[in-house]
Image (cartoon, helix red, strand yellow):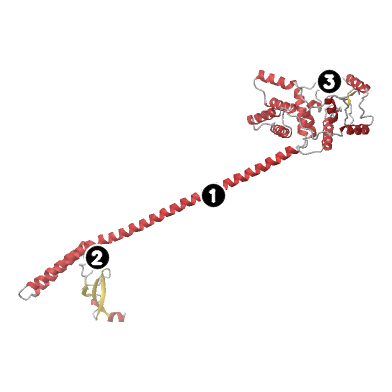
């Protein structure tokens, strides 16, 4: 057998490989990524699942973009499945205890097995096997790297975790072994003989000190190994539990483990629902607080509007009062002037002359103009001969036959006034119009 051949029994790592790896790590100080991955694989095959998971996580954390990421994730998934189904450091429990009729089962197995199930084995068969092994040429022991790569191929070829019957598991193991044998570089056939498990009855009899009678289930006949010289070589080394588990796939979960997983899933679902409810409650509280804030802001705005309206009303009243108060004072002064003229006429012993009356009214007019002047109101002093439509307004028309007198101002009926340069009241006048000219045109 050459070192390049990859067999199933090569997948079982050498017990001294982890110790050598630890020594190399202590001497070198730091190992490369591939060596760490092989070390994690060795831990997995030896059943040190927790250490394997920790090392895989450390590799992925150090280099998330590693080329070995698919293999590392697959190894982590396998280790996690093994931890769930068979806890580290504990042996799997037996499916059921042997009942009281175990001796009868043993006898039935002997009857069915015939010569193959007899308790007395032919000593010559052991000698023949020993001679066959002795005749086989010695081969170099596989290195730790070859064993790690062979085990990785077996792990990668293993199916995803699924429940399988014992018959399906046995068939899967046989197929995996045949695939591994057909892919050897040298074309030689290598067969690994797996010893059948010892029956529970035999174990009990051995513990009780009775006759150790081993009853074994019928196993598939082991095929020999054809070497280059034609000699048959039989491999008597049994594969490790990790290699057998990787080849046959995961076994059925114990009912208690399945129930525990179901309860954990239900518990996780309940926790998720509780989180959603708590989130809804938090959102409702936030909405209520936001509504209260909006209501408070609305009340404050209403109060501000009411206060603003009140201030505007007060300002308006004060403004009107402040604007009209000077006017009222001027009117009172005008009242005083008219009252003085009246008193002068009443106190006079002689009859009031026309000139005195005109002078009294002129004084009153001047006081009125003074009051208007304080309000920026001025009388229009212009008196044009013809109509000026800008500040004059005709209120009456006088017909004339002379075209030259057309639109001529004949009389000012009322004076006009300006306020800050704008016409407050136009000057009302009487205008002459020539109708004859209009008719001829």
**In the orientation shown, which residue stands out farthest toward the right?**
115
Mark found first going from the N terminus, 2 or 3 = 3
Residue denoted by label 1 = 284
Q: Is residue 192 visible?
A: no
Q: Is residue 231 above or below residue 340?
A: above
Along the horizontal axis of the image, is 339 left or right of 231? left
Say which quarter of the image contains residue 88.
top right
Q: CA distance from mark 1 to mark 3?
A: 76 Å
Q: Quadrant of the C terminus?
A: bottom left
Say which quarter of the image contains residue 146.
top right
Q: Is residue 94 visible?
A: yes
Residue found 30% across the figure and 81% down from its top? 439
Residue found 63% across the figure and 43% down from its top? 271
Of residue 423 and residue 125, the one placed in the foreground of this image is: 125
Mark found first going from the N terminus, 1 or 3 = 3
Residue denoted by label 3 = 139
- Assess disc 2: are there few (<14), some (14-19) or many (≥20) residues with their C-alpha within 10 Å of its C-alpha: some
Tag 1 and tag 2, C-beta contact below 8 Å: no
Q: Nearer the viewer, mark 1 or mark 3?
A: 1
Residue denoted by label 2 = 418
Does dot 2 land on a helix, a strand or a loop? strand
**In the orientation shown, which residue stands out farthest toward the top?**
27
- Assess disc 3: are there few (<14), some (14-19) or many (≥20) residues with their C-alpha within 10 Å of its C-alpha: few
**In the orientation shown, which residue stands out farthest toward the left?**
349
Along the horizontal axis of the image, is 110 left or right of 58? right
Q: CA distance from mark 1 to mark 2?
A: 70 Å
């Amino acid at each position: 057998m050459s070192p390049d051949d990859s067999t199933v029994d090569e997948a079982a790592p050498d017990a001294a490989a982890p110790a050598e790896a630890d020594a190399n790590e202590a001497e070198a100080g730091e190992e490369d990524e591939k060596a760490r991955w092989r070390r994690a694989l060795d831990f997995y095959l030896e059943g040190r699942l927790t250490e394997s998971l920790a090392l895989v996580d450390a590799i992925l954390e150090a280099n998330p973009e590693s080329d070995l990421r698919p293999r590392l994730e697959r190894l982590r998934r396998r280790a996690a499945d093994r931890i769930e189904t068979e806890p580290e450091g504990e042996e799997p429990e037996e499916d059921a205890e042997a009942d009281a009729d175990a001796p009868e089962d043993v006898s039935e197995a002997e009857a069915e097995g015939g010569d193959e199930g007899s308790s007395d084995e032919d000593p010559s068969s052991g000698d023949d096997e020993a001679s066959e092994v002795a005749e086989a040429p010695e081969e170099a022991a596989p290195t730790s790297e070859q064993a790690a790569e062979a085990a990785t191929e077996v792990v990668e070829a293993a199916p995803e975790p699924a429940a399988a019957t014992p018959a399906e598991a046995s068939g899967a193991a046989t197929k995996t072994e045949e695939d591994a044998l057909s892919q050897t570089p040298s074309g030689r056939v290598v067969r690994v003989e797996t010893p059948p498990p010892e029956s529970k009855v035999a174990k009990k009899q051995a513990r009780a000190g009775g006759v150790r009678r081993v009853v074994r289930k019928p196993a598939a006949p082991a095929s020999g190994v054809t070497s280059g010289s034609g000699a048959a070589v039989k491999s008597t080394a049994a594969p490790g539990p990790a290699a057998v588990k990787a080849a046959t796939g995961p076994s059925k979960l114990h009912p208690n483990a399945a129930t525990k997983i179901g309860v954990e899933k239900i518990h996780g679902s309940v926790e998720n629902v509780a989180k959603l409810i708590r989130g809804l409650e938090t959102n409702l509280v936030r909405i209520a607080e936001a509504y209260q804030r909006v209501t408070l802001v609305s009340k404050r705005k209403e109060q501000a509007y009411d206060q603003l309206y009140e201030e505007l009303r007060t300002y308006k009243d004060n403004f009107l009062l402040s604007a009209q108060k000077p006017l009222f004072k001027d009117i009172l002064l005008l009242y005083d002037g008219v009252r003085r003229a009246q008193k002068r006429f009443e106190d006079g012993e002689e009859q009031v002359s026309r000139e005195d009356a005109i002078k009294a009214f002129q004084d009153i007019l001047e006081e009125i103009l003074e009051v208007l002047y304080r309000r920026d109101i001025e009388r229009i002093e212009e008196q044009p001969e013809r109509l000026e439509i800008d500040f004059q307004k005709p209120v009456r028309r006088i017909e004339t036959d002379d075209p030259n007198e057309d639109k001529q101002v004949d009389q000012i009926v009322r004076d006009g006034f300006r306020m800050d340069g704008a016409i407050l009241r136009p000057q009302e006048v009487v205008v002459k119009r020539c109708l004859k000219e209009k008719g001829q045109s």
